[in-house]
Amino acid sequence: MSELSIFIDESGDFGEVKERPAYYLVTMVFHNQAVDISKEIEKLEESMRISGFDLEYIHTGPVIRREQIFAIYSIEECRKLLYKMLYFYNKCDIHHDTVVVNRKEALDKIALSGRLSKEIAKMIARHSTYFEQFDKVIVYYDNGQVELSAILNAVLSVLFNDVEFRKAEPQKYRLLQVADFVCSMELLKIKREEKRLSKSEEKFFYKPQELKKPFLKSLEEKRLK
């Protein structure tokens, strides 16, 4: 039986829009279970150990902002950590896509739920040929937002013949961390285009064109076509 794993992360929330512009993003990372990536995971963890990082979770946003447990590291150490994630991401045989909803077009919870449902369904339909090769789909999400969990269950249960949903902790799945990485980069792409990167983001990606190349360029290369 051919099996596809989908690892999901989101950016944004269902609350009142307090900032403009604002967006809600849902990233899906697709991994064909017939493709073994255990060696890539081992290399990532070995590289982290050698560099002195004792971390289960590479959480991209806090790494860039040097928040939470990443506050103890220098900016150069955090940059090194993010490049390790980028290298791991590039080496894994995976694909992804992201749904983006502009909150100007979905100001309240009901409107946002409707738009997300439609956009997720459109994304799955757009890649129908890819999904048809799999007999079973397993969806991994940390259930961080109840509203999104309900949308995923409702939409994907209709679109896939055999789908299973698993609540998953990011600390236990490197590909959930990849979904977080991709989702964060997709948001940075939007902010870069709108010329509103934060000071901490500009300080982190201080080299000219560094965010665009290699980070955003890699995103386009692995986006599901």
Image (spheres, rainbow, N blue to C red):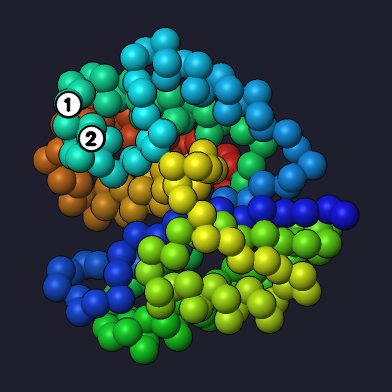
Q: Is residue 72 left or right of residue 166?
A: left
Is residue 208 in view from this perspective? no
Look at mark 2 in the image and give the residue it sits on: 69
Secondary structure, mark 2, is helix
Query: Is the N terminus in the top left, top right, bottom left or bottom right quadrant?
Result: bottom right
Residue furthest right in the image: 1
Q: Residue at x 62, y 33 (%)?
A: 92
Residue furthest left in the image: 199
Q: Position of residue 162 (x, y in %)?
A: 77, 70
Residue furthest top in the image: 50
- The quadrant where residue 6 appears: bottom right
| Three-letter amino acid code at the position of disc 2 | Ile
Q: Residue at x 38, y 63 (%)?
A: 144
Q: Residue 161 got which mark?
A: none
Above or below, 25 relative to 14: above
How crowded pointer 2 is (Cα within 10 Å; few <14, some 14-19, many 20+) is rated as: few
Residue furthest bottom in the image: 110
| Separation of residues labelled 2 and 1 (CA atoms) | 7 Å
Q: Position of residue 12 (x, y in %)?
A: 31, 65
Secondary structure, mark 1, is helix
| Three-letter amino acid code at the position of disc 1 | Ile
How crowded pointer 1 is (Cα within 10 Å; few <14, some 14-19, many 20+) is rated as: few
Is residue 142 in view from this perspective? yes
Look at mark 1 in the image and give the residue it sits on: 72
Q: Residue at x 78, y 74 (%)?
A: 161
